[in-house]
Amino acid sequence: MSKEITVGFIGNPNCGKTTLFNAYTGANLKVANWPGVTVERMEGAIKEHNMTIHVVDLPGTYSLTSYTMEEQVSRQFIVSDQVDVIIDVVDASSLERSLYLTLQLLELDKPMVMALNMMDIVEKRGMEIDLHRLAEILGIPVVPVVARKKKGIQTLIHAAVHQKQAIGPTTAGINHKPLSIHDERVKEHAMVYSKEIEETISKVEKELQKEYGLKDTRWHAIKWLENDNEIKEKYSLNVDFDSDGYETEIINEKYDFIQALLHEVLLGKKQKEELTDKIDSYIMHPIGGILIFLLIMLAVFGLTFLLGDAIKGYVEIFIDWLIGISTVGLERLHVSAWLIDLITEGVIGGVGGIITFYQISSSYSWHWLFWKTVDIWHVSRM
Ligand SMILES: Nc1nc2c(ncn2[C@@H]2O[C@H](COP(=O)(O)OP(=O)(O)OP(=O)(O)O)[C@@H](O)[C@H]2O)c(=O)[nH]1
Ligand SMILES: [Mg+2]
C-alpha cells in the first residue's frame, strides 16, 4: 500500500465538511451555520496508520452538474485522478436532500465512504436510521460521525484508508444487497436505471470507448445523456438515437430510488407515517370523524365552563377584597360617602362584574372557539 493517500471531503453546503477538516488537522478554517462558507479547496495532512493522509476540504455542492465557480472547484477535484478516496459528507438530519449528490458520486466508480454527520441532531429528534441497510444498499461503508464533537472521526479515516483499492459494491467489503434485482448490473452499481436508460447508457459507453478510448465510461455516459456542457464539448458523438429528453428521466429515476431507499432506512419516519395514517383513518371516518369532532367540542365546552366557574369564584373574592380595602382607605382620606360608593361599587364592582361575565360568556370567545375547532377539523379532513 502506498505511503500517501489523498482523501477529499465533498457534500452539500453546510453539512460540516470544514468542521471535519478542522477536527482532523487542528486547523481553524471558517465554519458557520450557513451555506457557501468554503469557496476554495483547502489541504491539510495527518499522519495515521504509518502513512501520510492528505485531507482536502471542498466547497459545498448539491450535485456534480456545476453551475457556480465553487461547484466547479469541487467537481474538478473529485473527478480528477488526484483523489484516492472520496468521503461523502452527509447531513444525516436531511438525508433526503443529500442523497442526490451521493448517487452521482457513486457513478464515478471511485473508492468512497459515507460520513453520516450530525448524528447528534438525529438522536435529539428521535429519528432512527438503519445504517447497516444504508451501507448494504449503497455498497459503501457508512460511518456515523459528530464532527463538532470529533466523534467517529477515527473510524471514518480508518474506513477511508481501507477503501483505497475498493471500486464499486463488489470490492467495497460490504454485503451489497440492492433495493431491487431487476438487472444484472446491480452487482456492480448501487443504482441501476430502467431497462431503456441502461441500454442507452451502454450504447454511449461503447461509443466513448470506441471514439476516445475511455475506460471508466459510466459516469461520462450518464453525464453525456444529461447534456452536461463540459462532457458534451469534450466528447462529441454521432449516435443513432435521439439523445434529448434523457436528462429529466435520469433525474426522476434518481429521486424515485432515493424515496425507495428512505422507505427502507428511515425507521423513525416509517413509524411516524404509520401513526399519522392511523390517526387519519379515525378522523376521516364518515361517522367516527363526526363523533370525534362532537366529543372534542363537548370537552372544550365542559372544560371552559369548569375552568370559568373556578376562576369566576376567585375573581369575585378578589373584587370583594379590593372594594373592602378601597373603602377603608378612602374613608381614612375623608372622601365623601357618595364618591366612595361611586368608586368602589360603581367602578371597581362594575369592572369586576364585566371581567367575570366576559370570561365565560363572551359570545365572541365562544364564536371564535367554535369556528376554530370546526376549522381544524375541516383542515384535517382535507
Ligand atoms: N449539531 C452539529 N452541528 C455540526 C456538526 N458538524 C458541523 N456542525 C455545524 O454545522 C455548521 C456548518 O458547518 P461547516 O463545517 O461550516 O459546513 P461546510 O460543509 O463546510 O459548509 P460549506 O463550506 O458552506 O459547504 C456549523 O454551524 C457547524 O458548527 C455536528 O456533527 N453536529
Ligand atoms: Mg466549509
Image (spheres, rainbow, N blue to C red):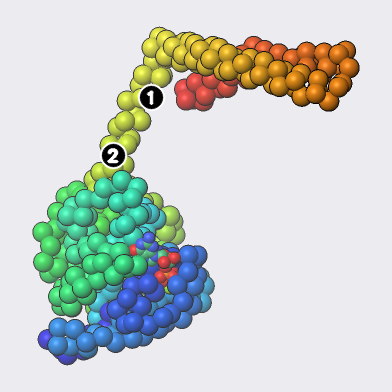
Name the side, left or right, on which 153 lies relative to 165. Answer: right
Return the residue nearer the eye: 11 or 331.
331
> Sequence-wise, which precedes: disc 1 or disc 2?
2
Query: Residue visible at 47% across and 22% down?
Result: 381
Splitting the image into 4 quarters, where does residue 309 fall?
Answer: top right
Query: Residue visible at 44% across and 11% down?
Result: 295
> Hey, what amino acid is under mark 1?
Asp
Where residue 4 sits: x, y (%)? 21, 89
Ligand 1 under 8 Å from disc 1 Cβ: no
- Count of residue discs: 2
Q: Which residue is mark 2?
A: 270
Query: Residue visible at 25% across and 43% down?
Result: 267
Assign a secondary structure to mark 1: helix
> Hey, what amino acid is under mark 2?
Lys
Q: CA distance from mark 1 to mark 2?
A: 15 Å
Q: Which mark is residue 43?
A: none
Q: Which mark is residue 280?
A: 1
Return the residue nearer the eye: 134 or 214.
134
Is 273 drawn above or below residue 310 in the view shown? below
Q: Does the CB distance between marks 1 and 2 fall below 8 Å?
A: no
Where residue 380 sits: x, y (%)? 47, 25
Is 377 drawn above or below residue 202 in the view shown? above
Where residue 341 sits: x, y (%)? 82, 13
Splitting the image into 4 quarters, where does residue 87 fall?
Answer: bottom left
Q: Mark 2: few, some, or many residues within 10 Å (few <14, many ≥20)?
A: some
